[in-house]
Image: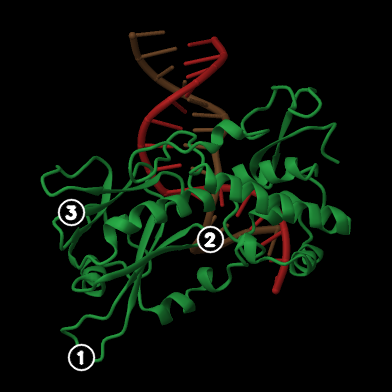
Chain colours: A green, B red, C brown
Amino acid sequence: MPELPEVETIARALAPGLVGRVITGVDVPDAKVLAGPKRRAEFAAMAVGRTIEAVGRRAKLLLVNLGPRPQVPGDGPAVLAFHLKMTGRFHIAPPDAPDPDRARLLTRLSDGNTLVFADLRRFGTARALTPEALDAWDFYASLGPEPWDMTPDAFEEALARKSTRIKAALLDQTVIAGIGNIYADESLFAARIRPDTPAKALTPSQRRRLLEAVQAVIAQAIAAGGSTIRDYRTPDGVEGGFQNHFQVYGKSGDPCPACAAPLTHAKIAGRTSTYCRKCQK
DNA sequence: CTTCTCGCCTGAACGC
DNA sequence: TGCGTTCAGGCGAGAA
């Protein structure tokens, strides 16, 4: 389930195989993947003939930056925005490879390779947009800062405005971008804060600790290449490594790594949240 | 305006 | 063995 560290890992792994290539065609075996402009022809018209200039990420979105089409006078740039949701995966397939299972969108490249977007559960989406349309997309425009761009003061202010529990506030992409269930639970444990504490009720020092914990956990996860639970793989087919460093996520009943009391779990903000009753206050 | 709940999808894991 | 149920979970839509 790709969150910020997994999408970052994917973007870094894809870039060398994509940057500099021209998009020569797009096949969309499953039209459900298209969001925004829904028609295959519109997506292809926006993408084909452009050179891939960069592969990046914002929150959990994978962004492919495309240059203007030289054959279109006065043309501007464009962006492909992919959301992997739960089971989205990317890989670059060589020319003779058969189209793989669960392929939802195939981007043909000038070097003969194909960028394959596969997605077992079909929640993932792809959009082809102008940069102006990307900025005007409500979801994109409302995203909060990346964890390392968040300042203690801004975090303080954002949490003070929330009437939800802190777990829900961390998952709220308009507060801080890129955190999902795994990194919310791990960050709350690292900061020793109970996930059901009202966001407003945190002390200033708890808020500082929490932001530092989020930043540290995300950085460690990126360094480890993300976390593989079931489906996530890097574009090279490699599993992440951070699942071996989980302290609490998915470990209900196991001993707390700090105090050895059994970890408990509860449904908070609609998601299973695992924490230590003794260590997290 | 803010917050909450449901539906979208498929496969794995579990109980009987 | 086989069937039914539950769970995973980000986000859009509609309700409260």
Residue A218 position, x and y percent, is: 60, 50
Q: CA distance from mark 3 to mark 1?
A: 28 Å
- Residue A155 visible? The answer is yes
Residue tagged 3: A113
Determine if marks 3 and 1 fall on one subunit.
yes
Kind of residue at badge 2: Ala
Instruction: Answer with left or right where residue A208 lies relative to residue A104.
Output: right
The subunit letter for the residue under badge 3 reads A
Q: Secondary structure at mark 1?
A: loop
Residue A205 position, x and y percent, is: 87, 55
Name the residue at 87% across, 59% down. A204
* Foreground pick, A161 / A70: A70
Residue tagged 1: A73
Q: Please, which residue is most extreme toward the bottom here? A: A74
Kind of residue at badge 1: Pro
Q: Secondary structure at mark 3?
A: loop
Is A178 situated above or below A271?
A: below
Quarter of the image where one finds residue A101 = top left
Residue A16 position, x and y percent, is: 31, 57
- Residue A3 visible? The answer is no
Determine if marks 1 and 2 fall on one subunit.
yes
Name the residue at 66% across, 54% down. A215
Quarter of the image where one finds residue A127 = bottom left
Is A20 situated above or below A214?
A: below
Q: CA distance from mark 2 to mark 3?
A: 27 Å
Residue tagged 2: A59
Q: Secondary structure at mark 2?
A: loop
Q: Check disc 2: other Cα within 10 Å, few if <14, some if 14-19, many if 20+.
A: many
